[in-house]
Image: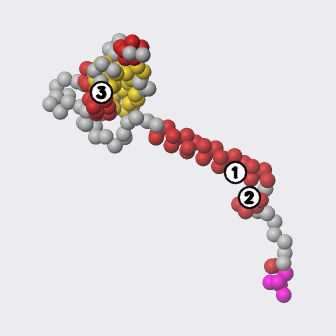
Amino acid sequence: MATTQALNKPTTMRGFGGLLRNKRCQKAMRLLTGTGVCALLSLGVYFLTQNFSRWESADKYADHGRNYNLTPFDINDAARVCTNKTADRFGDQLVRSYVDYHSTRYDARLAIYKVFMHAQLGDLYLHSDAPVHCFVDPKEHIVTHYRSFEARKSLMTRAISFISF
């Protein structure tokens, strides 16, 4: 008889199940879940829109014939690494590329070389310019950030298309 009375006794809302039934906690949980989902989606979009591969080997674009122990890695090596990466990235589309040494620099705060380039894509007469930003880690000799921006038509290409109209 005592056991049936214990089973029929009303229970109080305690523990985690009680929190889920509370409307204020439900709103907080929905807000927390929504914020977490948005943060994960934002991170996913960020990493999917990057123009570099995290699985590249450290020495893929470095000079294999050079002994970096004798002569330290410098801005010219960083520019060479970025030039090789640009040639690999654009392949046959690349007409020529050149480094903007006026903007290229070593960022001591981040301990990276920031290399700014221009890549000309297309053919020799009709090509477009694509600015390129490339960051190189001098310790690992690896490209840590690579981004090419939308190509814009060169002045020569615009002049030829205007005259041929």
Residue at x 23%, y 24% (from the top left corner) = 72
The quarter of the rendered structure image containing the N terminus is: bottom right
Looking at marks 2 and 1 on the same chain, the residue that comes earlier in the sequence is marked by 2
- Is most of the magenta stretch helix, strand or loop? helix
Q: Amino acid at mark 2?
A: Leu
Q: 10 Å neighbourhood of mark 1: few (<14), some, or many (≥20)?
A: some
Question: Tag 2, which secondary structure?
Answer: helix
Q: Is residue 59 above or below residue 8?
A: above
Q: Does residue 4 show up magenta in the picture?
A: yes
Q: Tell whether label 1 touches label 2 (CB within 8 Å).
A: yes
Question: Which residue is tagged 2?
Answer: 20
Q: 10 Å neighbourhood of mark 3: few (<14), some, or many (≥20)?
A: many
Question: Tag 3, which secondary structure?
Answer: strand
What span is colored magenta in the figure? Answer: 1-5
Horizontal and vertical percent position of residue 161: 40, 17
Question: Which residue is tagged 3?
Answer: 94
Q: Amino acid at mark 3?
A: Leu
Mark nearest the camera among 3 and 2 is 3
